[in-house]
Image (tube, coloured by chain):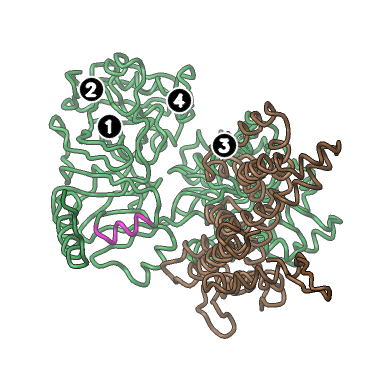
Chain colours: A brown, B green
Amino acid sequence: MAAVTATTAGETTIREPGPLQRAGITLAHVLSHPLGAIGFVLVVLIVATALFAPWIAPYSPTAISVKERLADPSLSHLLGTDQLGRDLFSRVIVGTRTAMTVALTALSVSIAIALPLGLIAGYGPRWLDAIMILVFDSVSSLPMIMLGLAVVVLLGPGVSTVILVIVLYSVPSYARLVRTQTLSLKTRDFIKAEQVMNAGTPRILFRHLLPNVIGPLVILACLDISTVITLEAGLSFLGLGVKPQIPSWGNILSDGFAVIRNSAVPVIAGGAPLILATVGFTFFGEALRDALDPKLNPERKP
Amino acid sequence: MNAISMNRRHFLAGAAAGAAALALRPGLSYAVEGDTLIVRGASDIEVLDPAFQNGLLEEEIGRCLFVSLNRLDDVREGVRWQPYAASELKQKSPTEIEFTLHDWLVWSGDFGPVTAEDVKFSFERVANPDNASPWAYAFDALKEVEVTGDRSGIIRLKAPSAPFWVTTLPYYMGHIVCKKAVEAAGGKFTTEAPATAGPYVIEKWVPNQSLTLALNPAWKGEPPTFPKVQFQIVTDDDAAALAYESRALDYTKISLNTLATYKDTLPEKTQLIQMDGNRFSWLAINVNNPKFKDEKVRRAIQYAIDVSQIMEGSYSGLAAPATGVVPPALVGHREAILYPADAEKAQALFAEAGVSDLTVELSAQNDKTSQLTCQIVQALLGAVGITVDIKTYDDAIYWTLGDKSAGDTWQTLEIVLMNFAGGVDPSENLTWFRPSQIGIYNWSQFDSPEFEKLYQDGMAETDQEKRGGIYRRMQDLMEESGGFVFITHETFAAVAREGLKPCILADGYLDMTRFTKA
């Protein structure tokens, strides 16, 4: 949405809103829809919990006290304790940080790799595009969980392995999106003008194309956060994700499942934040997409 | 075409009818009072050939299809055996075992009577290194089988072997197969036995679902109580407990977590079976790794680990700390370990060794019990200043870690959480720590000539008291090396319907031919 300003001479000029103003407009649009508002609140809550986890958690999430194992929820242990006597509330809180660290790191790395690959595929020669598309499609055709299991078996479980699995899974689809955007943009007049003025390929790619393709990519990544969090939890649940002592929602679920006959609290404690995070990031991502997509948001038509 | 309408009432009515049909279906109803015994199979079958089978369900099915010269009794009654396919089985001399087969034993498929030639073929086939049977080690002591008549023969040993009677003859490697039939089948077989002579035959096999056995009409020996036995294949312990609770099984092994729950609330008309298991677990410390070259460091680790905490946290307080690899029920069991937990001694030894900021890698399988144990070990070693990096592996990778034929990892291993299935004789539990097993299953790289000599002495010794002393000394040597922290002999737990008398063997597997009604 552009701001219209009246001048003293009676002329009108159109002034583009600044980045902050644009963010404000987008946020207002997200909050104007109930699901978007719910998503936003959940996302803020999750991100804040991840940021301030060490101050919120009342106990060390890894401190073992076997004598206090499987304690019921109480004032001293809000969600009770797990099989090794660790405070479940503290593990859930610090698990939020694990989930966000894995998700944000993996998606940032994916974007950083996919952007140049997609730009080169879309702007480069046809033969290079064909080879890169073949590689992207080949990797994408592998079932995600099978790919994850294969990588984990080869490298052993751990945070870095989980991140690698997510990067391998995400890069082809992100690079494909960037390529499609690039193919569409490279025939536009402003790119042709640059070419006529003999602008170098790096300048065209990174100065003109990149700013125009990064927006949709970030929205896609935002929508993928919930998938990535679920993938990390799934691998950890199977004992193939982050190491067992590291608090993660998947580990909490896995530990809880083993003692579900004694108490359902650990399973709920691991499952509930996973559901909330999935719902939150999905609602927020969809609202963000609606707000930024001119086809879905008539107010943003140019 | 009319659309099928389904409202809530239809759904409830349908569900009730379905549940009733399921409950009344003969195969899945409560069966102990009937003719069909339904038990859990922990895996499907792949190879029924006794020379090449993998264990689990194959071992239990094999015991129903084939016969052995002798057979073991329920382990809860002690390690005892009685003749089975043999009408007579006796020690003629320290290296000779004389046998005569029952005259009523016949092969299915017109292959005639079971003969001494079949016994010779069966044993020598497993023992022959050219056949690469994984169970050849069990026949290390075998020299030859001499056939003295159609149904009689003499088993000759290279040297006296007390374990041969209980670790070789009654187990799957000692099952007798039909020479003519196996040779006609090309020398080996997988899921279709060319001829059987045991009390049951396979009636129906639905891969990955169930396997049903029916009585062998040609069987003239002691008849099994149940004319039909059905194995429902359920790989997960907890899922099996749920199947038992829904009355789809009459007997199943259960996990320790389920055991803890059942100790509080037992399903109705159920008997709970709990006994010392024969699977033993321990921490293997690679004595050749530069981090553990100093014996003081290894000893400090032994002192630092309080196994009682592992029993509480990983085994729900339902298992007892091990004093070695020989369980309490066997000769050679030790009463106590040499280096009980003492954090102060551990710290003093580390200080003496001049070790600070030590980081060690602890490798384990990725099952829940192993993960919990690793975390407790991590906390206990952390308390004395050692940082532990836990690495868990899928089974397929894990079992290659200490295997020298799978790369160089075996040389750089640090600490590994291990567990093996034990046997009915202490030699079966100790054989893995001989020098020849370094780079195979001896992941501590414990290399003791004295241990090897004692092992050979123990195999030849027939006096049980003397054997006990030998095996206790062997475990002392293991512990003194600093390469071992013994954890537990895992508790065995199972549930059975009231009125059912299971027959459980020393390795936890079942002899279905001797399940009876109490």
CA distance separating discs 4 and 1: 19 Å
Kind of residue sitting beneath label 2? Val
CA distance separating discs 4 and 2: 23 Å
CA distance separating discs 2 and 3: 36 Å
Label 3 sits on residue: B455
Q: Residue at x 62, y 58 (%)?
A: A222
CA distance separating discs 1 and 2: 10 Å
Q: Which mark is residue B67?
A: 1
Label 2 sits on residue: B114
Mark 1: few/some/many CA within 10 Å (<14, 14-19, 20+): many
Disc 2 versus disc 3: nearer the observer: 2
Please indicate, yes or no, whether residue B122 appears anywhere in the rendered image.
yes
Q: Is residue B259 magenta?
A: no
Coordinates of residue A48 in the picture (x, y in percent): 68, 73
Disc 3 versus disc 1: nearer the observer: 1
Label 4 sits on residue: B133
Kind of residue sitting beneath label 3? Tyr
Secondary structure mostly seen in magenta is helix
Give SS at disc 4.
Answer: loop
Chain letter of disc 1?
B
Give SS at disc 3.
Answer: helix
